[in-house]
Image (cartoon, grey):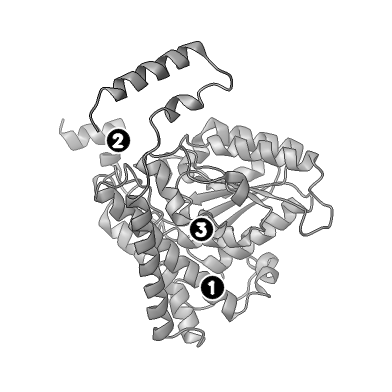
Amino acid sequence: MSDDEVAASSGSPTGHEPPERDITDGGPDMVQFLAADGTRVEPSETTEPYAAYLEDVDHEAMVGLLRDLILVRRVDAEGFALQRQGELGLWPSLLGQEAAQVGAGRAMRPQDYAFPGYREHGVAWCKGVPPENLLGMFRGVNHGGWDSHEYNFHLYTIVIGNQMLHAVGYAMGVARDGDVATGDADRDTAVMAFTGDGGTAQGDFNEALVFASVTNAPVVFYVQNNHWAISEPNDRQFTIPPYRRADGFGFPGIRVDGNDVLASYAVTRYALDRARSGQGPTLIEAFTYRMGAHTTSDDPTKYRISAEVDAWKAKDPIDRMKTYLTAEGAIDDAWVEQTEGEADELAKRIRKACQTMPDPPHEEMFAHVYAEPHPLIERESASFADYQAGFED
């Protein structure tokens, strides 16, 4: 038996044959306001429940969303470049998922709390986390890089699906604090939990849906279906799309075009309003695509074909927004040039901040192991200090 035959029989990635159907087609249930060619989609029964959430989004606001998309993509590109140059140990790229993240992030109010995975750089941007702060953990100089309570944006979670339970627990606390359904727009609070399609297979994810359902927690589950859980395609992860998973737990599930920032924004606003007003959880599936590797340690050419990537390039979230706003007369070449210049300056700032990050004192690795003093840790800390003292400067 050949290597390819072995791979196919064992179910390994190299034996994967892409499905014959168009995997870029989200189907009739997918909410979309801006088509891939940059034209507005005609109103329909699918979009009607969410259209009101775009009524106050004028051209100026849309230009702001496009600026977010461009700057977030540049932040991501700089993170990738820094890893390749040895400045970071790892970088998980969001290339292709900018609209899903910016749409969701901008829909949140300041008091809303986000629980990310490890790829939510766009949500972090919208919540005000300085981009350079994202790099500390991946450079290995800190355990997070920002104060989660300052930004209402939790630290990145590497354990797949773990953050979903954290989010539900926090949402249950919000409800017990009485910060739901008060009618005060500055007080009512919702929680968002972000994961990828691969995260839906985790026990933590399903347990979180149970707790959210039975407690009517003010939480929005946001699944970015980028079609690949590292090297595993959708057809090896589930037999029904993620948004329909909500049916079994008794709350709404919505599929949105995750490459359409307007649709992502409108649907997320709708779901957050439900949560804040005491109507309970919602599951949103943002139908998008991971254009790059899972992380910089991954080689996607080993498990997916270039034709698939090319098909998704035609649905690029930035290109469609540029096309639409240019046709509307809201932006021109000068605006694009200026914004790209702003992105260049942002990249320079991030690069300098990364390269000049101070290493943490060695003793810090022992400082937060236990809440109280611990004899073993104290002995290990003292021994390590003696060891370090033996080196010349």
Nearer the N terminus, badge 2 or badge 1?
2
Q: Quadrant of residue 315?
A: bottom left
**One can see residue 214 in this view:** yes
Horizontal side of 201 relative to 31 (left or right) equals left
- Nearest to the eye among marks 2 and 1: give it: 1
The residue pinned by badge 1 equals: 64
Nearer the N terminus, badge 1 or badge 3?
1
Q: Is residue 313 above or below residue 155?
A: below
Residue 352: x and y in percent read 34, 57
Nearer the N terminus, badge 2 or badge 3?
2
The residue pinned by badge 2 equals: 12
Q: CA distance from mark 2 to mark 1?
A: 43 Å
Q: Is residue 239 above or below residue 388?
A: below
Residue at image coords 25%, 40%: 14
Residue at image coords 16%, 30%: 1
The residue pinned by badge 3 equals: 125
